Amino acid sequence: MTWIFENWERFWEVTEVHLRLSAVPVLIGFVLSIPLGWWANRSQTARAVLFPLANVLFTIPSIALIVITPVLIGVKILDEINVIVPLVVYTVALMLRSVADALSAVPGNVIAAANAMGFRPLRRFLTVDFPLALPVTIAGLRVATVSNISMVSVGALVGLGGYGQLFTEGYQTDNTPKVLAGLIGTVVLAVLADGLLLLIGRLLTPWARAGR
């Protein structure tokens, strides 16, 4: 903690980088996982293809994806997109099953009632299906967010990575307080992000609280 207070500007700088590199992939991955999860819920063929593919992608080491990304998309090795793209892949891989399972858990009688009331598919999805699937979806989003916050540090191996830079610099200079500062920052950021998403989930699903 002493190192953080003595080097506050440096700590805040890596905090901003870490937050950006973890938040952007979560947002993009979340948006992408919604139509993919909907498709997997509607089609057994899509489920049979997407779920195994997501499992395979999630097993690829993050450092391998970070190193190969600039080769695949033609950017510089120190471009932040080299961390963002792999983390988007991991977010989609984690969120895909959560979204699909959440949509499949929507009660059939509710869907039938909405159809009987003349709801078109898109309107029903936006006003009935997805809102009812939010509790499970946000639970998956919390897992993906915390995972991203922890994995961002790997980017330090190629010169990026927020708190990961404190890990590598501290290790290279035998500066244990700097390593601990990075560890504390990562844990605190993960706890705050998880708590924020939990609060958002409660605010967006008042019926879930009423049911309990």
Image (cartoon, rainbow, N blue to C red):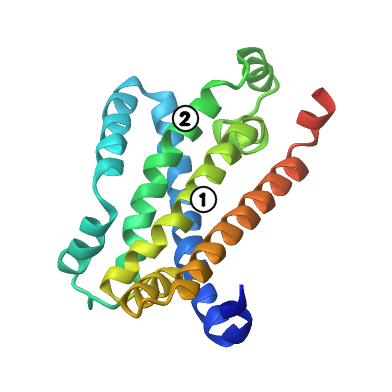
Q: Secondary structure at mark 2?
A: helix
Q: Secondary structure at mark 1?
A: helix
* Residue wearing tag 2: 100
In the image, 104: left or right of 81? right
Image quarter where the N terminus lies is bottom right
- Label 2 crowd (10 A; few <14 / some 14-19 / many >=20): many
Outermost left residue: 71
Q: Residue at x 69, y 43 (%)?
A: 201
Q: Position of residue 157 (x, y in %)?
A: 28, 69
Residue 146's disc is 1
In-image side of 195 versus 4 (left or right): right
In this view, 7 is above or below 205: below
> Mark 1 vs mark 2: which is more N-terminal?
2
Residue located 50% across and 73% down the image: 177
* Quarter of the figure with residue 185: bottom right
Can the viewer see residue 28 in this picture?
Answer: no
